[in-house]
Image (cartoon, rainbow, N blue to C red):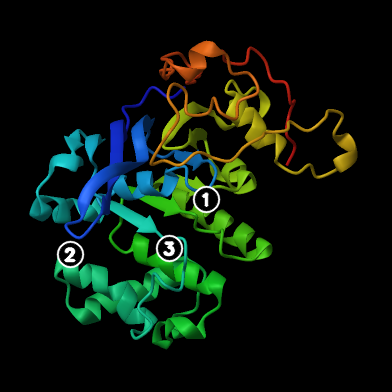
Amino acid sequence: MTTTEPLLQVRNLKKYYPIRKGVIARTVGQVRAVDDVSFDVHPGETLGIVGESGCGKSTTGRAILRLETPTAGSVIFEGTDIATLSAGTMRRRRTDLQMVFQDPYSSLNPQIRIGDLLAEPLIAHHRLKRAAAQARAAEIIQVVGLPRLYLNRYPHELSGGQRQRVGIARALMLEPKLIVCDEPVSALDVSIQAQVLNLLKDLQGEFGLTYVFISHGLGAIKYISDRIVVMYLGKVMEVATTQEIFTAPRHPYTEILLDAYPEANPHLRDRPRIIVEGDVPSPAKPPAGCVFHTRCPSAQAICTTEIPRLSTDAHPVACHFPLLASKNGKVES
């Protein structure tokens, strides 16, 4: 466990969306996309956030960067709660906080050349002259493995992997301290995914970056993350190092996620599959007690009424009956 002060501290973060109906748009309920999420991110590490689609991991990433205004909670970056900053003050802090989006095409303006796309952040935030900003863009585009001639191309003239490299280059332009990567490889071919993941790791070592890496793919999460946050229905289920998550999960949901992870050699599987019945409940009407109890094979009466709190030990878990040892064994790459 690292002893350095956290670069980012997320505490009791919530993001609710109102459900409105009728002519006057009366609020009749709320979608609890993120519900009481807490974790730390230390300088130079990669914190992975994993879970099923709809678990709130992308909303968490957007709320960290104030692309979504949190309903409650704090996001403390370098000692300052950026969740409470004014729009003007937050704009000045954005140079330290950047994002790589999931879709490398829709996140780039199709009407602007790559060189202008990369120069724009420096012009907007640092008031650089266009010539100086484009000179910096020419340096950064080579750092992410693309030739300078691509500066004169439009996004549609690039492949998916090349466009994602441009997205990464744009995030690097302001020399940020923290980058939130929201499913950055899920839209790419498998071979290109490996290239982008390797690029992110190389850039982290070169520039001393800190990542929050969001994905539903366990392979990518395992490869790039130092620690992992497991989320389900807007809540944190478990936080641990990558090795602990993959070899000794403590939450039944984490165990089920790992059981769904495909073996490189199916003949090595010497245990039956864990069968999970039912669908993920709606975040507009989450179950009482533990949100996972409706699908948990280990649920007991207390799970239906009492919300489990995230433990404060070295391997935090939000479960009334955490697993004492791994039942599913080591997951090989």
Query: Seen in the image, is 153 located left or right of residue 120?
Result: right
Find the distance from the CA under tag 3 to the CA under tag 2.
18 Å
- Mark number displayed over residue 258: none
Q: Secondary structure at mark 1?
A: helix
* Residue carrying label 2: 125
Residue at the spot of label 1? 201
The residue drawn where x is 25% and y is 68% is 121
Q: Position of residue 24 (x, y in %)?
A: 16, 57
Q: Quadrant of residue 268?
A: top right
- Say which residue label 3 marks: 168
**Which image quadrant for residue 166?**
bottom left
Mark 3 vs 2, N-terminal side: 2
In the image: residue 91, left or right of residue 152: left
**Amino acid type at image mark 1:** Lys
For the point 43% across and 87% down, the residue is 153
- In terms of depth relative to the viewer, which is nearer, 39 or 259? 259
